[in-house]
């Protein structure tokens, strides 16, 4: 089975790191974090100055590494499919290198890294690479992926969304879902 996995807020705690670094940044700038995020210029400045640190310091989610390793050991191919390089002013190569380094440092084994995907293209990318199952934290991406005929799990360990089908809140449930799907 080819399994696509989003990186930010699915494998790693990116949003939590953004909040943590934003708090420090806002304090140094004598601003409120919300004022920075709500102002296009201030937000762009924050991310251009802190994006690498955010990506490098993001913590891995509980059980993500072990579940991905077990899935891979069972013959599944793991594809990281991320929109990282398109979200802010960064080069594709730089984001790819940061991502590859982060995965290695956290001992996350994957077969392929596909970065610089536009949100609108995530479903098409899944189709192009013949992904059997995609795991993503974003409801918009979920809809785009499913509309391309790809099975998708909405991962939400912060329980922000209300969805009854293909909805999981932790990595161990992802593993159970995949094993159940493979059995039939």
Image: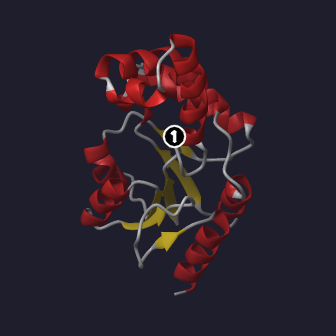
Quarter location, residue 53: top right
Q: Position of residue 4 (x, y in %)?
A: 48, 55
36 w.r.t. 171: above or below = above
State left or right for residue 177 relative to residue 84: right
Judging depth in this view, the residue of 170 and 106 nearest the camera is: 170
State left or right for residue 130 relative to residue 106: left
Count the marks: how many?
1
Extreme residue in the bottom direction? 184
82 w.r.t. 57: above or below = below
82 w.r.t. 4: above or below = above
The residue carrying mark 1 is 113
Task: Write the residue at 51% across / 14% down.
Answer: 30
Q: Position of residue 7 (x, y in %)?
A: 53, 45
Quarter location, residue 54: top right
Badge 1 element: strand
Q: Does the image show residue 63?
A: yes
Q: Does the image show residue 127?
A: no
How packed mark 1 is, by other alpha carbons closer than 10 Å (few <14, some 14-19, many 20 or more), is some
């Amino acid at each position: 089975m080819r399994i696509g996995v989003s990186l930010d807020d699915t494998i790693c705690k990116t949003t939590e790191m953004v909040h943590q670094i934003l708090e420090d940044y806002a304090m140094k700038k004598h601003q409120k974090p919300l004022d920075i995020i709500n102002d296009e210029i201030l937000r762009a400045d924050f991310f251009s100055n802190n994006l690498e640190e955010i990506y490098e310091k993001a913590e891995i989610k509980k059980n993500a590494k072990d579940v991905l390793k077990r899935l891979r050991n069972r013959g599944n191919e793991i594809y990281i499919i991320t929109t990282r390089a398109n979200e802010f002013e960064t080069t594709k190569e730089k984001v790819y290198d940061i991502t590859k380094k982060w995965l290695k440092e956290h001992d996350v084994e994957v077969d392929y890294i596909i970065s610089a995907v536009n949100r609108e293209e995530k479903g098409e990318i899944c189709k192009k690479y013949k992904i059997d199952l995609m795991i993503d934290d974003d409801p918009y991406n979920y809809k785009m992926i499913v509309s391309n005929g790809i099975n998708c799990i909405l991962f939400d360990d912060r329980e922000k969304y209300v969805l009854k089908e293909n909805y999981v809140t932790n990595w161990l449930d992802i593993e159970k879902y995949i094993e159940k799907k493979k059995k039939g």
